Amino acid sequence: MKSKDNPNHPWVDRYLEHLLIEKGLSENSLAGYAADLASLLGFLRDKSFSLKDLTDQTLFLYLTYLRARGLKSRSLARHLSSLRGFFAYALDEKWYKEDPGHLLENPKLPKKLPEFLTREEIGRVLALPDTSTKLGMRDKVMLELLYAAGLRVSELIDMKVLDFDPQTGVLRVFGKGAKERLVPIHYTAQDYLNRYLEFTRPGFKPVQDFMFLNRSGKGLTRQGVWKLIKKFAMMAGIKRSISPHTFRHSFATHLLEGGADLRTVQILLGHADISATEIYTHVESERLRNMHRQFHPRSSF
């Protein structure tokens, strides 16, 4: 696996091929791993160190170097995650007798609560597209699905026509690492999607089998969906910056507000680890604290 960010160390090449072929990582994710490992290899080369003889002391020097370059805690944690993945693979391949990164600890990360829309704001945005037009109907269905199924933008634009089962009202979604999950959608979203597929989509004169198409009949880009979201947010009078992922956060938050359990939300979102889903419990806790401060009779004391 050659990359402009990769000095083509054979161990790194093997690992990146493993991520591409066996793990099915996206091009963007693969590029991130390649860049992180290239950074380590560049540091080792400059210091005349060897990847084969890597020690925990060398890694501590490397982390000091990264901090001196101004890498923040969140970027540093992501960087360490890339290295740990490589070391785990290297151990399986018997390239190391022991993990050189076993003493590394992740930096403490500030808890950043995800941005989400209120139900009233969601309603305003969903009401905006003009469903009497071809593009308006497409946009309406995309917005409905982002909120009805908690989709990532990549999952939305990669969705094919046959990924929707109109008999059961279930979407087949391919998430990170090409992992498949089934997500039921509510009747309103089903109705709009059925009408779009039967009457609207053929008007785009499809040349690709993606569910959502541009004026040329081809699949949409991430940037295209981002622009649409920003346009509708502005039209709805929402001042803060939102993205397609805001709909996913809103989906999870509103499910928990409605009484859904965390495990169900984890499955619907396609999170491999429930710790990724637990952030939404903090959102709910913060909302309850705000309500308490606002309405409790002694909150002003």
Image: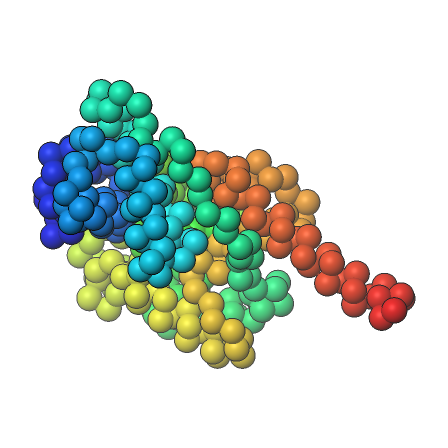
**What quarter of the picture does the N terminus occupy?**
top left
Can residue 67 be seen in the rendering of this structure? Answer: yes
Q: Say which of 135 and 80 sits in front.
A: 80
Give the residue drawn at x 89%, y 65%. 298
Q: Horizontal placement of 177 versus 148: left or right?
A: left
Residue at 48%, 54% (x, y): give it: 248
Residue 114 lies, in percent from the top left, at 53, 57
Coordinates of residue 281 in the picture (x, y in percent): 63, 48
The quadrant of the rendering that contains the C terminus is: bottom right
Q: In this orientation, which residue lies closer to the viewer: 190 or 160?
A: 160
Q: In this view, does 242 lie above or below 27?
A: below
Q: In this view of the protein, which residue sits in the foreground, 252 or 134?
A: 252
Q: How many labels does the image show?
A: 0
Q: Residue 35: x percent and y percent?
A: 22, 50
One can see residue 162 in this view: no
The x, y position of residue 265, in whole percent, is 55, 42
Identify the coloring.
Answer: rainbow
Please tell me whether residue 263 is drawn above or below residue 138 in the rendered image: above
What residue lies at 84% left-to-right and 66% top-to-bottom?
A: 299
Q: Which residue is drawn at 62% across and 54% down?
A: 283
> In this rendering, is residue 13 above or below 286?
above
